[in-house]
């Protein structure tokens, strides 16, 4: 099936114009959804939603940095395990997020005061993230707006030559088997999995459709993720942090120098 772009409401001229502009961008990227699910990118003048049709009722995903748990993580960014895993870097350090997904980790790192180069290879996921960042920038919260401004989105697979200089550290959350999740997260998982059940738009590079708590089940192989890690290490001056399920082995052919173990997730640490 195809991914339909639909203005909402359909008679809103701003939504219609935005729909045409987004369709041109997806066409220019060569994106074609080849999965079996009926998906709609619902385009409002001020927000995007990905809708999975075909069930008893449609499932809707609208990334939002303003409300809910993300705001809590922002407020206590310095205490988040991911931030501690990055280690001691400068106050205005430059961090790579090699698989940004819907941007929760990227915005968390930015809330710490760091500049973040966020790479997301899937064209539709990148559009959703771009939209969420724009809404965060205009939500009336100065701290949130400042964090959003520190995230530079690259709608592509990670490539070191996209950056003018090595970063101070990097984080990477490759696709891996689904973790246990609550009902709300399972809804997001369903939608993202339906989007990912299609030919890979950029084969050979690992990518994330969501963060640790809301993570997409993956089609990427462990060797693909290891190749991305190999490209990240020379692109950083400090640590590369790789998220893994708590009981999983390190990425194949790699040996982390240390790890930070959590209940559900482990952070493997590599040095440049």
Image (cartoon, grey):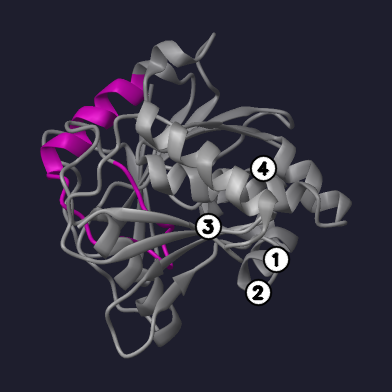
- Residue 183, quarter of picture: bottom left
Residue 68 is labelled as: 2
Q: Secondary structure at mark 4?
A: helix
Element class at badge 3: helix
Q: Which residues are magenta?
A: 207-233
Residue pointed to by mark 1: 71
Indicate which label's residue lies in the foreground, 3 or 1.
1
As drawn, the label of residue 110 is 4
Local SS, label 1 = helix
Residue 105 highlighted magenta (yes or no): no
Question: Residue beneath label 3, please?
Answer: 81
Q: Are marks 4 and 3 in contact (CB under 8 Å)?
A: no
Q: Position of residue 78 (x, y in %)?
A: 68, 53
Q: Earlier in the sequence, mark 3 or mark 1?
A: 1
Picture quarter with the N terminus: bottom left
Q: CA distance from mark 3 to mark 1?
A: 16 Å
Residue that extends furthest to the bottom in the rendered view of this protein: 56
What residue lies at 48% left-to-right and 53% top-to-bottom?
A: 102
How packed mark 2 is, by other alpha carbons closer than 10 Å (few <14, some 14-19, many 20 or more), is few
Rendered residue at 25%/24% (across/down): 230
Q: Is residue 108 above or below residue 49?
A: above
Query: Residue 170, can we see it?
Result: yes
């Amino acid at each position: 099936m195809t991914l339909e772009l639909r203005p909402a409401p359909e008679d809103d001229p701003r939504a219609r114009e935005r729909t045409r502009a987004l369709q041109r961008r997806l066409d220019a990227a060569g994106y074609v959804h080849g999965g079996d699910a009926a998906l709609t990118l619902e385009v409002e003048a001020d927000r995007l939603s990905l809708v999975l049709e075909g069930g008893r009722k449609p499932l809707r995903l609208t990334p939002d940095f303003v409300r809910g748990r993300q705001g809590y993580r922002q407020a206590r960014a310095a205490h988040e395990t991911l931030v501690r895993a990055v280690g001691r870097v400068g106050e205005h350090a430059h961090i790579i997020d090699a698989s940004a997904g819907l941007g929760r980790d990227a915005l968390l790192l930015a809330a710490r005061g760091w500049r973040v180069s966020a790479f997301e290879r899937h064209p539709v996921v990148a559009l959703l993230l771009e939209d969420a960042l724009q809404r965060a920038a205009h939500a009336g919260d100065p701290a949130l707006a400042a964090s959003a401004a520190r995230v530079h989105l690259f709608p592509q697979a990670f490539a070191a030559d996209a950056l003018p200089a090595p970063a101070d550290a990097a984080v990477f959350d490759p696709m891996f088997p689904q973790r246990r999740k609550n009902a709300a997260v399972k809804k997001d998982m369903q939608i993202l999995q339906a989007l990912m059940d299609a030919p890979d738009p950029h084969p050979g590079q690992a990518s994330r459709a969501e963060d640790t708590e809301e993570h997409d089940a993956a089609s990427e192989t462990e060797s693909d993720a290891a190749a991305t890690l190999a490209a990240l290490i020379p692109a950083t001056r400090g640590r590369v942090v790789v998220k893994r399920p708590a009981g999983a082995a390190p990425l194949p052919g790699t040996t982390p120098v240390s790890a930070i173990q959590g209940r559900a997730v482990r952070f493997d640490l590599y040095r440049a």
